Image (cartoon, grey):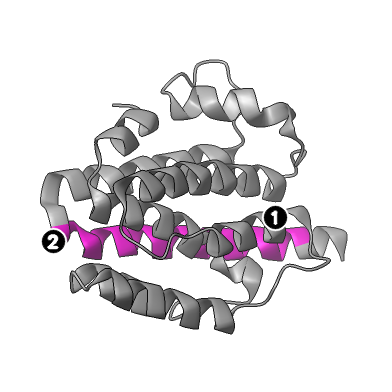
Amino acid sequence: MSLVELIAQADERALAASGLACLDRCVPLLGGDDETLRPLWGSLAEDAAAEDWAERLEQTRGKLAAADGADAAAALAYRMLTTAPAGNSAAALREWAHACSVSALRIHRILDGGAPDEHVADAIEAARGGRTEGLPLSPLGAAELRRQIAVLEVLAGHGPAGLRRAMEVSTEGRRVLVAALSRRNRRDG
């Protein structure tokens, strides 16, 4: 099943986890670490009220660096954070999950040395729709796409019990992103 289809079929918790997982993998761009988004993951695991999610989201926003003057990758990560819905509306969460998916794929393309411009939008949408044959997906981008699919599949198959595995997938992806950032800094620095 394609990523787009998985997002279309996901429930509110899976949608929130999908967007949060994308943000979690990219949080080092904003100065965050393994613990930064843990309160939000906890809110999903506890099946907390929307007010609790909103409160934890605001606290998290206050902890992370703004992307003023930042590079394109950090600006995309910051947009994921600032556009996270405070409520648990399926429509708002689905829109956020889609936007986070695209942003995370663009970030990984940038870190792999690709252009940050919109010319890659068609390739990203094709990949999200399951059409990867012959597309210019970078190795980081292809791995990110697999992680996004894995998060939604584990939540579809295991419900709330899949949150732990979704967090593990995100932690692995965050470490890959940190290594890519380090390579980029050595190359550019």
Residue 4 versus residue 139: which sits nearer the camera? 4
Q: Type of residue at label 2?
A: Ala
In this rendering, position of residue 98 left or right of residue 38: right
Image quadrant in which the C terminus is located: bottom right
Residue nearest the viewer, comparing 7 with 34: 7
Q: Identify which residue is drawn at 65% across, 54% down.
A: 76
The percent coordinates of residue 84 (x first, y second) are 48, 60
Say what amino acid the circle numbered 1 marks.
Answer: Ala
Residue at the spot x=30%, y=78% of the render?
52
Which residue carries the number 2 mark? Answer: 161
Main SS of the magenta part reads helix
Residue 73, disc: 1
144 on left or right of 29: left
Alpha carbon distance from label 1 to label 2: 32 Å
Residue 124: numbered disc: none
Q: Which residue ends up furthest to the top in the rendered image?
A: 134
User: Would you say residue 178 sits in the magenta stretch?
Assistant: yes
Instruction: Say which quadrant the N terminus sits in.
Output: top left
Q: Secondary structure at mark 1?
A: helix
Q: Is residue 147 visible?
A: no
| Tag count | 2
The stretch of residues the image draws in magenta is: 160-184
